[in-house]
Image (cartoon, rainbow, N blue to C red):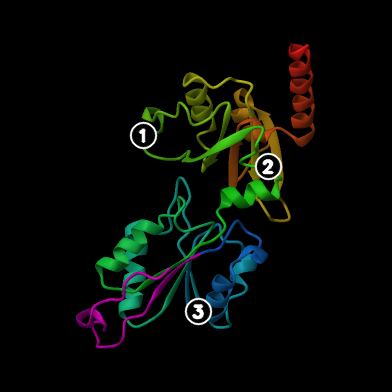
Amino acid sequence: MRANPPSRRQASGPQGRGVGTVHLVGAGPGDPDLLTLRAARLLMSASLIVHDGLVDPRILSMARPGAQLVSVAKSRSRHTMKQEAINDLLVREALSGRDVLRLKGGDPFIFGRGGEEVDACRAAGVPVEVVPGISSALGAAAAAQIPLTHRDHASIVSFVAGQCKGLTDQDWSGLAGKGRTLVIFMGLATAPQITEKLIEDGLAPDVPVAVVENATRGQMRVLRAPLAGLAELVAREQVQSPAIIVIGDVARAESERELRALALEAQAMELGK
């Protein structure tokens, strides 16, 4: 999806060269086969690629020979480049006449700060295109065969960031529970606080939880525990990013869901007698 082009007054950079385009591209959850065709074509033709740290190396290897790769990896404790500096880099390179491929894990507009980068480009008169990617939540759930919605178990899905400002002050009541699925991004480091918050907000300690680590990649793991055991599971298994936390009845193993469905069916038949 392309934003409106710059005005004629903004159509050239400071040296009189044409302004390049910034392409915000979603790299999906990891597996290169899950790139969109548009993303793959841009990746194989770009001369400058500014990428996140969690983009799979197999995807980066698809870049054309000689392409310049710039990592702007972020972690909880260390940022290679702050967001404002990333915005400035994209704008500066585009104003110099270069097209820029900004490659992001998952989808640019789901906890990818893509909106901030679009705003920076628009403010500078830089054309910008957004190429959606498979969100890591959707990719992880599909790879683990966890249906985020299910006619018998969940008709509502909520996405939240587990590593955001003011986490303890937020009200998460109603986001998880009967008929609902809660998907938490970036929740490993704050797993103890997340567990405490959800239980304090009324969620039962035995609600099923699944942690999907390295979704769609060769080393993918799907780990399960009750909500009360989430933090201990993360610590014991030494779960590393990228990982998604899925909370709700859909997170039960398939065999558990089948047994529960049979038990409910038997209970209903007994009540109907």
Residues tagged 1 and 3 counted as in contact (Cβ below 8 A)? no
Q: Compared to 77, does 44 lie above or below? A: below
Q: Could you give the CA–CA distance between mark 3 and mark 2, rounded to whole angstroms?
A: 35 Å
Quarter of the view holding residue 90: bottom left
Chain-order first, disc 1 or disc 3: 3
Q: Could you give the CA–CA distance between mark 1 and mark 3, rounded to whole angstroms?
A: 38 Å
Pointer 1: what residue? Answer: 166
Res. 146 mark: 2
Q: Secondary structure at mark 1?
A: loop
Quarter of the view holding residue 62: bottom right
Disc 3 marks a residue whose amino acid type is Ala
Nearer-the-camera pick, 20 or 132: 132
In x, y percent, where is residue 190?
50, 34
Nearer-the-camera pick, 160 or 81: 160
Q: Secondary structure at mark 3?
A: loop
Magenta run includes residue 164:
no
User: In this rendering, which labeled residue sits more in front, label 1 or label 2?
Assistant: 2
